[in-house]
Every structure is written in C-alpha cells, then in structure tokens.
Amino acid sequence: HPPNFQMEESFSLRRENCRAKGAGPGFKVAILGAAGGIGQPLSMLMKMNPLVSVLHLYDVVNTPGVTADISHMDTGAVVRSFLGQKQLEDALSGVDLVIIPAGVPRKPGMTRDDLFNINAGIVRTLCEGIAKCCPRAIVNLISNPVNSTVPIAAEVFKKAGTYDPKRLLGVTMLDVVRANTFVAEVLGLDPRQVDVPVVGGHAGVTILPLLSQVKPPSTFTPQETDYLTARIQNGGTEVVEAKAGAGSATLSMAYAAVKFADACLRGLNGDQGVIECAFVDSQVTELPFFASKVRLGRNGAEEIFPLGPLNEYERAGLEKAKKELAESIQKGVSFIKK
Ligand code: NAI
C-alpha cells in the first residue's frame, strides 16, 4: 500500500459514517461482475444515483482499478472493492440490493442458451453467497440466459430456505428500452413519451412486445407490427453482430440496468406507483416464471399485473413464447435439482 493508505482508509470510513448518519435514504448496493463490459458503466452510473450510499464492486478480476477510478467521482456514494471468491461474503454483507451482470456474453452465431454451461455455475455460486450473507436483499439478475438463470437462483434460494419470490427479479428492462426506442422511431415521437410493455422472457421469441398496449395509444400496420416485433426480439443480436466478436450490449444494458435498479430502490424507499417489467415468479400464466409489469415496493415485486387484453397476433406470439420458456425454465430448475 502507498504510505498514506491508512489515512485515506480512515477518511473513507469517516465519510461512510457521515453518510450513514446523514439525512435521507441511502441504500447499500453490490454489483457482482463489476469489472465487465456491463459492470463498469453500471458501476459508474450507480455511483451517480443519489439513493445509493455505499457501493460494493465485486468481480474475480480488476475491481481495485475500477473502484479507484470510480471512487474519485464527487458524488455521495462510498465505493469499495472486493476481489475474488474469498471476498464475496464481505461484498454481500448488509447489502439491500444486489445487481448481477457476471458471466460470459454472446459472440456472433451464439444464442443466449449457448451461455448456459458457464453462466449457470457462476450464478449458482453468487446466489449461494447471497443466501448466506444477505438473504433479504433484492436481487436484479442480468446474467444470461435470464430465462434459465432466474429459475436457477430460485432453486438455490429454496435449497437454502431463504427464497422470497418477490425479491428475485430477472432484468428484462433492455427489451423495454429497445421497444420504446424502436416504436418511437416508427411513430415519430420522442422515446421518453413512449411506454411499451414487453412480457414473456428475455430471448428471441420469448420477448413479446405488446404493441396493442403502447402508450400513447397507437395503431400499427401489419408490416409495422412484423418489423417492430422482429426488431425488438433481435435487438440483442443486432448489437452482437455489429460488435463482431467483441461481446454483446453493454452500454445500453448498463443504462437499462440502472433504470431498473433505480426503480427497485425507489420501491425500497417507499415511493408509490413504481411499475416496471421484470421476469419473476408468477401466476400470470401456467408457467412458474414470466415477465410482465410489476409494482415495486419495500418488499420487491409486491404486485404482478396480468397481461391485459391481447390481440390475435399477440396471442399467437404468447403461445410460441410459452413453449420455449417452459423448456428454458425447466433447464434451469434441473441444473440445481440434478
Ligand atoms: P463481460 O465478459 O464483459 O463481463 C463479465 C464479467 O463477469 C467479467 O468482468 C468477469 O470477470 C466477471 N465474472 C466472471 N465470473 C465471475 C464470477 N464467478 N464472479 C464474479 N464475476 C465474474 O460480459 P458482459 O458483456 O458484461 O455481459 C455479462 C452478462 O450479461 C452476460 O451473461 C450477458 O449475456 C448478459 N447480458 C444480459 C442482458 C440482459 O438484458 N439481461 C443484456 C446484455 C448482456
């Protein structure tokens, strides 16, 4: 350590105490996979969030550098680095919200399911840590394939006896962000004015935009519906191909993850009427997990909204989505149960 390390350390503790005593809410947030393509911009944006008082950055590589860099930003959150499996438990202790973008991303020609073998194990290890160290934390799971990693996390928590379905949320926000952008383009509107519910799951045909429920109320020609549905479902692949081997969406994903995490924190904070789409334990269909609009509160997803009226095109899409989703969910469950 440099000679003034201890002094810096004590100043940092002083600031953490000051922040803890200070007025207003402040939540402790951990990012697992914080040094990755998503993790770094996500860490930066969470450091800017006024609802965050302490930010724990955990990864198996490079967190000291990312933390040193981000800690110089003159925003309120205190940032701490945790490196390697031995520091996982410290990274998770006392945390209110855990965001997980750990794991390998797609390369051209790969489906999200091709990531299963590597990412399933990573998610299992991280969730075992959560069950042990912060079983009441809200979990935002980004690692793909989300359609399988969320069931994996649920099984790990069930095994540990800590499962609270309201607190486990698969992040499908990027599908909503893309849908808002692409629909706004077609309508000639500012994307900030547009709200598109996207339900189902987070892969290919399981991503089901409900264009009949777009706000502001809009109608689309059959060609526009086909174009928009396909573009929203393949938005991830569009980025994977453009990056040509360098990975998948990271910057728009970090933006979407922060938008979603901020909604979770506002819910924890007691704000009313916080509603976003997420992939959760659900009774909206006969499947055990499904993405739809949820109301976020002090306990996580406190209310899960039904799908609302679907048109014929969406009903056909729903059947396709459910078929694929059922298999992906089962694959996740058997990974832990086998
Ligand atoms: P990346 O490879 O750039 O970063 C992943 C990070 O995870 C690396 O820093 C790596 O060291 C870390 N990591 C690996 N094993 C770990 C472990 N056991 N514990 C903690 N950290 C570990 O990948 P990128 O682009 O950041 O993507 C991460 C994940 O997010 C991928 O699975 C990707 O498919 C997924 N993703 C999900 C989206 C969604 O909408 N839900 C959208 C885009 C990506």
Image (cartoon, helix red, strand yellow):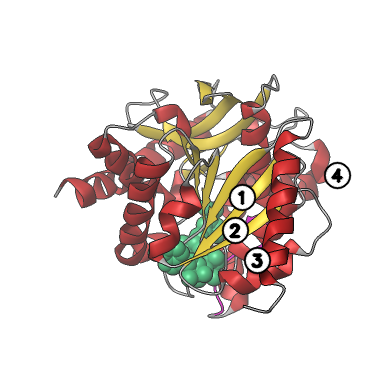
Residue 92 lies, in percent from the top left, at: 47, 48
Q: CA distance from mark 2 to mark 1?
A: 9 Å
Q: Residue at x 40, y 43 (%)?
A: 133
Residue bounds of the magenta highlight: 246-254
**Label 1 to label 4: alpha-carbon separation:** 17 Å
Which mark identifies residue 67? 3
Q: Residues within 10 Å of mark 2 (few under 14, many from 20)?
A: some
Task: Using the image, tell me which numbered label, if any, was put on residue 174.
Answer: 1
**Badge 4 is on which residue?**
190
Label 1 amino acid?
Leu
Front-most of residues 244 and 302:
302
**Amino acid type of disc 4?**
Asp
Q: Could you classify mark 1 by the number of other residues whose Cα lies within 10 Å: few (under 14), some (14-19), or many (20 or more)?
A: many
Q: Which residue type carries mark 2?
A: Gly
For mark 4, give the secondary structure. Answer: loop
Specify whether 219 is left or right of 162.
right
Q: Give the structural element (helix, strand or loop) at label 2.
A: helix
